[in-house]
């Protein structure tokens, strides 16, 4: 990453963020549907007409007569600033697709495809050497990311207690390069980094429902994700364009998935006002990741750090009266804020912290729901690039009565 005082030029190349060059990329939002407008809270959310893959224990709440299908797309605009250099970029992508149904009494099933991380950047730095050698330009670029397809189960063990598990297949790859060129032949070098990852991911969840009064229900939730070696190799190929030589180096078993923990609480008042809060920790600190050290491509446990994510969200429905003719009174209005610390280090120091704010709404369309949310995210750290991103997610939840038994007189 670029420190203040280094001449730089950012260039668009399907970029998500120059910070996606670190670690496995920018970690993706794992929320869906209604949760997006609440800034991604979900550990304690239970809803019979919404899929919540963030805590598999919630699957036990799905309506027995319906099949839920939720899919969403996301578009984003990003503004980068470093010293006097500014750049605007845009991108759009299919985001997620999940489905859920009840298999039998008190037992729900869910499946779907979710993003895990995204890599996309391209930028250049210009370093002035001396009058004889002139300047050296280094161009950094990268693309790729990880995805997961999951199958989950949620079981209501007791009236207040539900447990669940998500079993995921995790796959993806990345390609990164650093091309250095200038007046000096010493710097006519290209370094290419690549890896292909295929592994598994296991996440467990629990939810406890406690009635506080006839109008108030408190739900507490917790999640645990298992950490393990991903069993993938990383390759670095150094090519000298001056003499035509190419030298590959391989780091075996180069990546690890961290243990992760989350707790959450949600207070539901009269099914009209929902307040929720989440706290999550991922134990990336000390996990393996490849780097160039003393001219060699080796595994390092100094590049990543534990990260924390805090989110608070609210969902408000003006009325439950089915005879109220005001359409806007039957919409859900949502808002949320969040704060996250980085999971990677830059030059030995923690990367940028992230502040997020979201707004959204849910529009009823018969038994289905159109969910629209907007989120502003600001990544910043002293002497590094300022990243302001605004993203819009549009999701549609189909609520189909596939399992209703029709009676004909």
Image (spheres, helix red, strand yellow):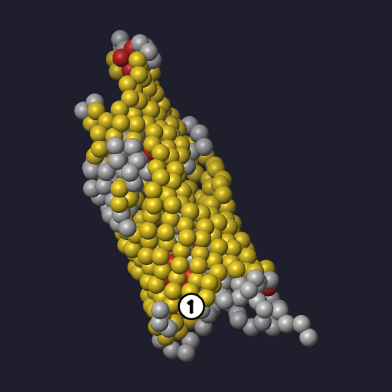
Q: Residue at x 42, y 59 (%)?
A: 167
Q: Quadrant of the N terminus?
A: top left
> Can you give x and y, in whole percent of width and height, for residue 340 in the image?
35, 55
Q: Residue at x 37, y 22 (%)?
A: 190
In the rendered view, does 224 fall on the left or right side of 85? left
Q: Could you classify mark 1 by the number of other residues whose Cα lies within 10 Å: few (under 14), some (14-19), or many (20 or more)?
A: some
Q: Is residue 306 positioned above or below 190 on the image? A: below
Which secondary structure lies at badge 1?
loop
The residue that label 1 is drawn on is: 106
Question: Is residue 408 visible in this depiction of the protein?
Answer: yes
Question: Is residue 279 visible in this depiction of the protein?
Answer: no
Q: Is residue 195 positioned above or below 31 on the image? A: above
Q: Residue at x 68, y 71 (%)?
A: 366
> Can you give x and y, in whole percent of width and height, for residue 290 in the image?
29, 37
- The answer to which quarter of the image holds residue 246 is top left
> Can you give x and y, in whole percent of width and height, for residue 220 in the image?
38, 75
> Can you give x and y, in whole percent of width and height, for residue 118 in the image?
45, 44
């Amino acid at each position: 990453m670029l420190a203040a005082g280094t001449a730089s030029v950012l260039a668009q190349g399907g970029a998500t963020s120059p910070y996606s060059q670190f670690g496995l990329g920018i970690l993706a939002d794992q929320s869906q549907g209604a949760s997006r407008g609440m800034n991604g809270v979900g550990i304690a959310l239970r809803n019979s007409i919404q899929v919540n893959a963030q805590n598999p224990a919630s699957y036990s709440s799905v309506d027995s007569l319906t099949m839920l299908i939720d899919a969403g797309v996301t578009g984003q605009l990003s503004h980068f600033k470093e010293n006097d250099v500014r750049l605007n970029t845009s991108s759009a992508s299919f985001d997620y697709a999940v489905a859920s149904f009840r298999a039998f009494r008190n037992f729900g099933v869910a499946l779907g495809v979710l993003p895990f991380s995204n890599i996309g950047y391209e930028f250049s730095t210009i370093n002035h050497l001396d009058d004889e050698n002139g300047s050296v330009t280094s161009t950094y670029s990268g693309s790729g990311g990880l995805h997961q397809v999951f199958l989950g189960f949620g079981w209501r063990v007791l009236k207040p207690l539900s447990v669940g598990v998500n079993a995921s297949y995790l796959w993806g790859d990345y390609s990164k390069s650093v091309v250095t060129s200038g007046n000096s032949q010493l710097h006519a070098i290209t370094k290419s980094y690549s890896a292909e990852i295929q592994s598994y991911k296991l996440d467990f969840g629990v939810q406890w429902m406690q009635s506080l009064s006839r109008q108030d229900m408190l739900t507490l939730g917790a999640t645990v994700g298992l950490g393990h070696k991903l069993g993938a190799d990383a390759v670095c190929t150094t090519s000298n364009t001056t003499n035509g030589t190419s030298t590959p180096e391989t780091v075996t078993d180069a990546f690890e998935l961290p243990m992760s923990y989350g707790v959450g609480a949600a207070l539901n008042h009269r099914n009209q006002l929902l307040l929720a809060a989440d706290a999550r920790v991922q134990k990336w600190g000390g996990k393996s990741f490849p780097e160039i050290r003393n001219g060699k491509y080796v595994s390092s446990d100094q590049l990543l750090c534990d990260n924390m994510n805090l989110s608070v969200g609210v969902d408000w429905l003006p009325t439950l009266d089915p005879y109220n003719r005001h359409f806007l009174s039957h919409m859900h209005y949502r808002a949320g804020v969040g704060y996250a610390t980085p999971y990677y280090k830059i030059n030995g120091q923690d990367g940028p912290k992230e502040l997020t704010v979201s707004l959204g709404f849910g529009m009823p369309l018969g038994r289905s729901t159109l969910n629209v949310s907007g989120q502003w995210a600001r990544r910043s750290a002293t002497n590094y690039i300022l990243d302001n991103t605004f993203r819009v997610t549009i999701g549609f939840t189909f609520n189909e009565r596939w399992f209703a038994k029709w009676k004909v007189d």
